[in-house]
Image (tube, rainbow, N blue to C red):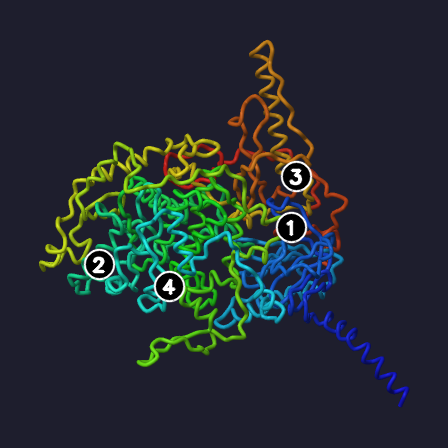
Amino acid sequence: MLTGSKTTFKVRQMLPDIKERMLSQTGVNTRSRDVFGLRCLPGECVLQRAVMVRKKLTAREGRGWLSGTLFCTHFRVAFVPQDSPKPDDNADPVLLGDHDVALASIEKVVVVGPNRTKLVTPNSSLKFTPEELVIYCRDMRVICFLFDRLTPDPQVIEITYTIAKTYQPLKPGSVLSFQNAALGSVEMKQFLSNRRRDAHMNWFETASDWEQELERCGATSWRVSSVNDRFEMSTSLPRFIAVPQKVFDTELKKSFAHFNEGRIPRWCWRHPRGSDLLRMASFQNNIYHEKDDIRNLEMVLFGCQSSLCVVVELGDELPSPADIQLAHGRLRTLCLGDISTSVSVPDDKWLSTLESTRWLDYTRACLKKASEVACLLRSGHLTVALQEAEDRDMSCVVSSLVQVMCDPHCRTQHGLQSLVQKEWVMGGHRFCSRINYHRDNDKEEAPVFLLFLDCVWQLWSQFRSRFQLTDDFLLALHDSIQLPLFSTFLANCQRERCKRSQNLGQSYTPVNGWRDVLHLDSSSDPSDPPLPPVWDWALQYSKEKQERFTQPVPPTPPLQPLLNGNLNTNPDTHRLADTIPGSVFLLSRGTFSCPANLLPWRSGSSSIYRKSHRRAPSSENVPGLERLLKAWALTELPQGLPSTSGPQGPLDPYEPLLPLLTAPCLGLWRECYLRGALHAQAFSHPISSNHLHPVERLAQEVQQLKDKLAQVSASTDSPNPPKTPKTPKTPTEPRTTADSNLNQNTNNGTFLFPAPRPQGPAGPRAAPPPPPPPTSSSKHQTSSRAPPPASAPPSRPGPRDAGGANKHTFLFGHSSVTEARPEQRYYPAPGNAKLPKSNGPSLAS
């Protein structure tokens, strides 16, 4: 018995070690720790791994390759470089690493073999061992992995099948399982519950938050109303709204029924010159308007102004959600391409195809409409009301862009975050329907928020010195919207967010009135994981990456107090203050009008309006308003003469940033849309970050020859020719230009070739266009000029390589040709030719 007791005691001592080994082998983790070099989240399971894998880096990451281990968990596809430091178990957990991709953001998986590609699905059967793994993401990324010859074949097959089975598009109800995989453990719930919110931004969730915004903007004639505290008046509006001081809540309640979904005119922002920006839905024409209702409606519509109100109709010129979805889909197809199909756009058709997507046209339309509204607000002493049928899509875009143009605070990181909270999250934008996380409502899907981010990037690219935030921040926000893990994007209105976070419903009884009761349903289960806001960037990015979200900008002088007056001194617009009280104009398609049916209660035959309103609308000031728009149009530079550093910003920091909308100035967000195209370059071997692409070296040689010709030509013309600095030949020297030209070869391979500017006396305009990519018959000959580095291991060989046969894949081809044909010539690419005089898109930004 004693011996048995000792044995039992020893076994009990060994049980924790045995259990730990079993858990590490099966991939089940009870706490955040290191598993095969991967720092797993609490409860995260490692399903499969593959060693000796290389990941291709993008140009933004420095290019080249990283060797490491590829993992697949039930939450993400993770890549751990072999030289990465050992993870710290005491550090806070990070949802995604620098080289990770969430399963929910994967769109499709393609494997590449010898001269073949295959789209992998859960029911696919592979008849060859993949050599390359290409992951297409919903956020416009394309991630490429190359399996080494030392990688065991079973690991290659298993991890390919594992990723294909786990990434599958989410179905109704599967979003919750994805959230539980990342946030459902007890440790993560406790960790998220102890997270503190960012105190530097305004969340607009309480009445004090709205009062703080009113005080910041100097809107002393407005107040915060809690008339919609229980979402009785409107289910899509926030709990608190800003209304004029002179309108009581009892009178305000009668106005909700006159607008679609009860979205009455409400305050958004006040310009420093005294104008107010409102948002509202369309009028309900079939509602009978009583005398008191008319007075309340006009008090709300005119706000704190008494002279002029301009209703800006957004449905005539701006795209519909269906148009945005169609344009974004075409843009994805053009920019990403698909190596599993043979459909491609030739080089000379690429820009015209980009124009046919209409994406840049829609971006231009939003910026133009926002510029018009900004110019109206700049004139002072008027109210501008943005009207949309449902007031939940394009009104969010235009109102946000107006504030970014006019308010320096909205061009900071915390300012833009607060702006998104106010105009999008609390404004009732249907994030859940437009992003379509559940994949169950394709008709409502439309990336409206991504269109807004593109417009902000256009402003940033033209006025970089006026923005404290950077394009890294915009790109991080663009990528985060594809993850169904953040409460910011997982609801259509504040009512749905409160319902999930508080698990409360409402019931009414004549005795007790309205009371909160526990609402038990599948969507608000108390066991659901808490969802963090997207603004908690530490959950996704390291401190080094967060530091690149901002840049230093000069301080903005404080606002001048506006005391019952108008700071506008423009002689062209000062007559607007003399407008007949109660004048209402409609701005549509760039012109002003006074339609009789603009306000339904004014077009009726009854005498209610004549008693409640003193004078009818007048068109006397329409020419004055039109001069505002003409003056704004004249601020643009002539086409073809844009400044290389962007337009010069106004001296007054509160003047609106009016962008240039001509074709050379409005460009494509290449760092976002074309980062996937970088992975489709046909390298002949893995090239390290210290080696240039063969075509880049060829372009450099052509530039050197042109510099020598310019030097010889200058020596014949002048007795003392200037010395031309030599172009550096060291490949490790960083390139100082970000210009690139998009071309495609005849074998459907997409190329992005940087075009370095010359250093000779010819100046920056003398830079020759980059050569076109080699054709399918000669791309390996060109690539063979540079031997592979000794440190780069060869690709996976197989039995099919016996006999000295050349090995070729779609992404990383291999050829035994060692010298290019002498008759092969390279002609200038048409990308640098002069652009036609039109408003078509361009990549010149």
- Circles 1 and 2, Cβ within 8 Å, touching? The answer is no
Q: Is residue 298 left or right of residue 366?
A: left
Q: Give the farthest residue toward the bottom.
A: 1
Mark 2 highlights which residue? 296
> Residue 637, which numbered label?
none
- Up-down relation of residue 842 to residue 250 (above or below): above
- Where residue 695 sits: x, y (%)? 62, 38
Query: Given the image, on which type of amino acid does mark 2 rest?
Result: Asn
Q: Earlier in the sequence, mark 2 or mark 4?
A: 4
Q: Is residue 222 left or right of residue 99?
A: left
Instruction: Report, in whole angstroms, how far the alpha carbon at label 2 lies from the one at label 4.
Output: 20 Å
Name the secondary structure under disc 3: loop
Number of the front mark, 1 or 2: 2
Please indicate, yes or no, whether residue 206 appears anywhere in the rendered image.
yes
Query: Given the image, on which type of amino acid does mark 3 rest?
Result: Leu
Name the secondary structure under disc 4: loop
Q: How busy is the neighbourhood of tag 4: few (under 14 within 10 Å), some, or many (20 plus)?
A: many
What residue is drawn where x is 58% and y is 20%?
710
Mark 1 highlights which residue? 56
Quadrant housing the N terminus: bottom right
> Residue 692, which numbered label?
3
Instruction: Report, in whole angstroms, how far the alpha carbon at label 1 lies from the one at label 2.
Output: 63 Å
Instruction: Report, in whole angstroms, how far the alpha carbon at label 2 lies from the one at label 3.
Output: 69 Å
